[in-house]
Image (cartoon, grey):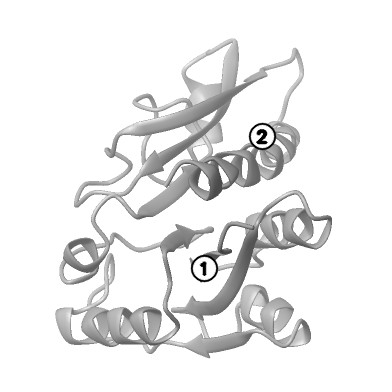
Amino acid sequence: MMKKLILGVLGSGKGSNYRAIQEAIDRGELNAEVRIVLSDVESAGILGFARDRGIRAEFIAPGTLRSRLDPETEAKVVKLLQGAQVDLVVLAGYMRLVKQPLLEAYPRRIINIHPALLPKFPGLESWKQALTAGETTAGCTVHYVDAGMDTGEILAQSEVPILPGDTPESLHARIQIAEHQLYPEVIRRFTVGR
């Protein structure tokens, strides 16, 4: 049997994508193990969910920079991930840009899911951007992480129609359903194709 893919998850929020990945693992659909969960938000739900499952979960004090971690903190993140023997770094609602030394330590081994059909609508609240722009479809994208904001190579996308009368909330809820199907599916490719 193939060795399990070891995942390290970085998140800033309630962790619904991490939950979807963990549930796919529990159902035996994903030959992987989440070994460590890190968050830049001390009260993040993602940490509580991981702790409830007996998975190592740590708060990483974000430091003074708003959009990313300072290099020293990012080096600490690398040490924690390497210490947990992580093969693939999974960003699940992680609201900071990833820079060095994390990109250097995990080249083409950091992935993110974004609630838009990139390259359209990078950045925050992209479902609102899609509605405002009068788009007829929205969706989500899984991509490799590089030094830019949502600019890495696209691995997969899932389209979600924008319906008449959609609110930002109703559209976002449907995009999240698509995310929860797409993200475990893309991670599964890493378990067979490495």
Mark 2 is surrounded, within 10 Å at the Cα level, by few (under 14), some (14 to 19) or many (20 or more) other residues, namely many
- The amino acid at mark 2 is Ile
Quadrant for residue 26, please give it: bottom right
Residue 155 on image: x %, y %? 42, 32
9 w.r.t. 162: above or below: below
Name the secondary structure under disc 1. strand
30 or 126, which is in the foreground?
A: 30
64 w.r.t. 126: above or below: below
Q: Quarter holding the N terminus?
A: bottom right
Mark 1 is surrounded, within 10 Å at the Cα level, by few (under 14), some (14 to 19) or many (20 or more) other residues, namely some
91 or 187, which is in the foreground?
A: 187
Query: Mark 2 or mark 1, which has the lower sequence index?
Result: 1
Label disc, if present, on residue 161 of the rendered structure: none
Name the secondary structure under disc 2. helix
Residue sitting farthest toward the right: 27
Note whether residue 11 is visible. no
Residue 141 on image: x %, y %? 49, 33
> Where does label 2 land, which residue?
175
Cα separation between marks 2 and 1: 27 Å
Label disc, if present, on residue 6 of the rendered structure: 1
Q: What residue is drawn where x is 63% and y is 37%? A: 182
- Horizontally, residue 55 falls left or right of residue 96, namely right
